Amino acid sequence: MTTSGVRVRIAPSPTGEPHVGTAYIALFNYLFAKKFGGEFILRIEDTDATRSTAEFEQKVLDALKWTGLTWSEGPDVGGPYGPYRQSERKDIYRPFVEQMVRDGGAFRCFCTPERLEQMREAQRAAGKPPGYDGHCLNLKAEEVTARMEAGEPSVVRLKVPTEGSCDFHDGVYGDVSIPWESVDMQVLLKADGMPTYHMANVVDDHLMKITHVARGEEWLASVPKHILIYKHLGLEPPKFMHLSLMRNHDKSKLSKRKNPTSISYYSALGYLPEALMNFLGLFFIQIAEGEELLTMEELIEKFDPDNLSKAGAIFDIQKLDWLNGRWLREKLSPEDFVARTLDWAMENDRLVEGLKLAQSRVTKLGELPPLAGFLLANDVGLTPASFGGLKTSPAETLEIVTTVQADLEKILEWNVTTIEEELRAISERMGKKLRVVTPPLFVAVSGSQRSLPLFDSMALLGRSVVRQRLKVAIQVLTAMAGAQN
Ligand code: GLU
């Protein structure tokens, strides 16, 4: 592998809770950089303005910092090729897009959303694969100019060869060949002047002098588009490595519906970042049984990108638990253990804010653990009896928790106000009083009907822990409702 002046990056999109998959890809890039004395860079890919939020960006930064990985350039630390946030680079992309249009690598497209929808509908009806049909591909230059001058909205699309295939080498997959006919005439510049992921990603990797692109296998099919953009711009593409995605035991894609996937969930439950990195690092190295407990230095030392483990990346929580237990017992001194425990309890102000909420509800301090302990506990031990005292039947309780679980995903910013607003809206939609909807949630979230204020508790626990508790509640209630039928 040629490795002089290695520069690699992690390029998360701040559109959701930071995912363990991001830590997994980040760790690979970090190990790669460290192995070869290169640079590891963080770039925020927020071209999707409707889904990207400042809250999620902060969470991405916090989650990656929690993992212990460090980057030498990024939105928080600056660097010679900044800004490192794509929304601040809008003007940088335009000349590259214009060059591609001028040189015939891309074209203006005036198709309206309605026409595109009709086209997709017709493709669906005819059983054809979806993709742009080339309606605007051969517009005359004068027509394009006239329509643009008349203020008609347009996008820029990539021109794609109609025959042959895109052949390239991938550091993990080996030689790959993708027929051009399966590649869509991708939008490169949106009507509002923002580039799409593909355009921004290529331009930034070039300008930030990225030498190796290591990312999830879901991007492999995008490589032909990227190679075309590099070619039309007369640039040398970086080396590509597409890593197999982490999967559940049943080989399905790791998704929050099956397993908690947020980094914040694992930090909230008291996994050590060292253990999570150790666990993820084992996907990239070959080691014998009995040698699994490894520090970051040892991971770097054993990392060999030419000899990656072929054994798919199964997210085996039992193995993570086993490694975490070993880290707690074998790698921390008693003093470190205590210090880490206190740090963990203080994380995100859970304990401090929880105690303030509990102050007016206790007569003796010894009542605090049963009252507020749910803020720190891994789970709240839900059983059918937990829901027993509710006025709602198991079926109605289940309906409430299930509806709330789905709707809470729609909240963009997770805080007391947005949670309260959403729960009020859900109650209204369900035609129920808020005081009917909240008791089942008290139980699901805290394990008890008498606990701290619900909205504050949910905010303190965080979205990923609440999601998991509601999921467990749904399992218990489904069994109860089933048993009653
Ligand atoms: N923004 C993309 C993501 O969120 C990055 C893909 C890449 O590394 O090129 O996964």
Image: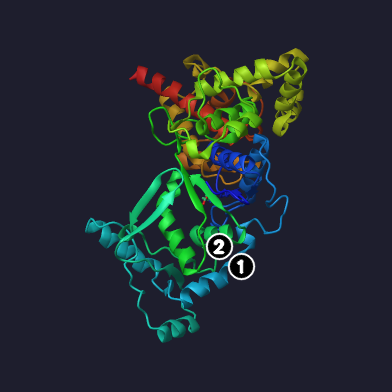
**Residue 94 image position (x, y, % from top left):** 56, 71
Tell me the quadrant of the picture where the C terminus can be found.
Answer: top left
Q: Which is more toward the observer, 184 or 419? A: 184
Q: Which is more toward the observer, 353 or 127? A: 127
Left or right of 450 in this view: 394: left
Q: Which residue is disc 2 drawn over?
A: 203
Q: Are marks 2 and 1 in contact (CB under 8 Å)?
A: yes
Q: Amino acid at mark 1?
A: Ile
Left or right of 253 in this view: 365: right
- Vertical side of 86 occupied by 464: above or below: above
Q: Ligand 1: does it lie within 8 Å of the C-beta at label 1?
A: no
Q: Which residue is disc 1 drawn over?
A: 92
**Residue 356 image position (x, y, % from top left):** 76, 28
Instruction: Describe the element under mark 1 as helix, strand or loop.
Output: helix
**How far apart are labels 2 and 1 at the CA level?**
9 Å
> What residue sits 37% from the left and 56% below the top?
167
**Residue 122 image position (x, y, % from top left):** 26, 62
Q: Specify the color scheme.
A: rainbow
> What residue sits 50% from the left and 32% below the top?
283
> What residue sits 41% from the left and 63% below the top?
186
**Residue 252 image position (x, y, % from top left):** 39, 34
Q: Which image quadrant is residue 481 in?
A: top left
- Vertical side of 184 occupied by 284: above or below: above
- Badge number at residue 426: none
